[in-house]
Amino acid sequence: MVLDVKKITSAHIFVTGGAGYIGSTLVPLLLENGHRVTVYDIFYYGSESLLSCSLNPNLHLIKGDIRDEAHLVEAMKDADYIIHLAGIVGYPACSKDPELAISTNVNGTENIVRNLKPNQRIIFSSTGSCYGAIPNGYCTEETPINPLSLYGSTKADGEKLVKEVNGVILRLATIFGISQRLRLDLLINDLMFKALTEKTFDVYEAHFKRTFLHIKDVARAFLFAIENYELMKGQVYNVGGDSLNFTKLEICNFIREAVQDCVITPSSQGFDADKRDYKVSYEKIRKLGFEPKISVRDGIRELKMFLPSISNEFILKTKNV
């Protein structure tokens, strides 16, 4: 079933963490589609990622922390939609500062949910890390979640909060690709950077199956959720595509095709705390009409073009994710 949806025009969209990796790609897309956007962000890495939108009168920036409930409530009071991206992302970052992870990912989400007005809608950025270890190696939205890392458990707690207010939950595949606020700690981005700069990298758990999604398709998914909110509300959706399920070794082979002089070495060192080794079904969101447009090979070509020319200062910022 492909929906024939009337385009929503001129909604006021409040984006937490809107200057980050996802937000810096999503916010321009929302503005291009005629929406008013308020970005609520601590701007830890500055606001430079949104400079391309600087002359757009429909963009408003507010420096704030989702843990500051009073400030948050005032900032979000006039929004039609809240897209909640802000959080401590990934199990290494959460493990480094567990208290910050819980206060941001759980308590911060609770602050938003507790103060939603009846007419406000929320779309929550979640993760496949909620699934944990899957016995049969295949998961749908009906598969019981069993998060194994602090990151996965805080996002699972966030999902519960958003379900209570009938919001939309998007469980995103592992993201890759160039964004105005680049991250190099994501699998494909990280391995491609090492292949280009060091000409070698090692890979652990190479047989593990993972699922991927380009950053531009992530942004499209949030816009899709806005335009189909009434149909999607109260539900969880895996976001990705069946053609983007690969083992880590297959990803390495794609990189070797693009950077033929790099050396890839299997390693017994390292492990994925989230135990992501499964194929994910995307039938539920595909039936509504959403399909990714950008392949892994396309994303690798993009990374090969841009990564060799980025500045050392920019690289240092990405290392502090």
Image: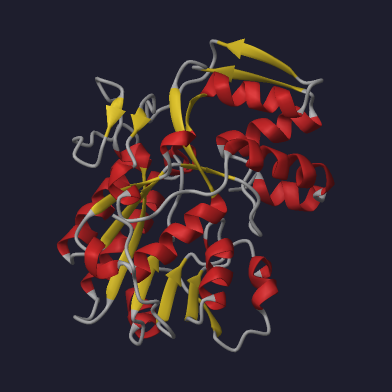
State the residue at coordinates (34%, 42%). Answer: 282
State the residue at coordinates (78%, 52%). Answer: 313
| x and y percentages locating residue 50 in the rendered image | 64, 70
In the image, taking residue 103 as reference, residue 245 lies left or right, namely: right
Q: Is residue 250 visible?
A: yes
In the image, taking residue 119 as reference, residue 31 lies left or right, namely: right
In the image, taking residue 137 as reference, residue 181 lies left or right, namely: right
| x and y percentages locating residue 166 in the rendered image | 18, 65
| x and y percentages locating residue 260 in the rendered image | 79, 22
Quadrant of the image containing the N terminus: bottom left
Quarter where residue 139 is shown = top left
The relative height of residue 235 versus residue 238 in the rendered view (above or below) is below
In the image, taking residue 111 as reference, residue 8 lies left or right, namely: right
Task: Report the residue that reaches farthest toward the left.
Answer: 164
The relative height of residue 136 versus residue 284 in the rendered view (above or below) is above
Q: For this rendering, which residue is in front, 257 or 134? A: 257
State the residue at coordinates (30%, 50%). Answer: 287
Q: Is residue 67 visible?
A: no
The relative height of residue 286 versus residue 42 in the rendered view (above or below) is above
Quarter where residue 52 is shown = bottom right
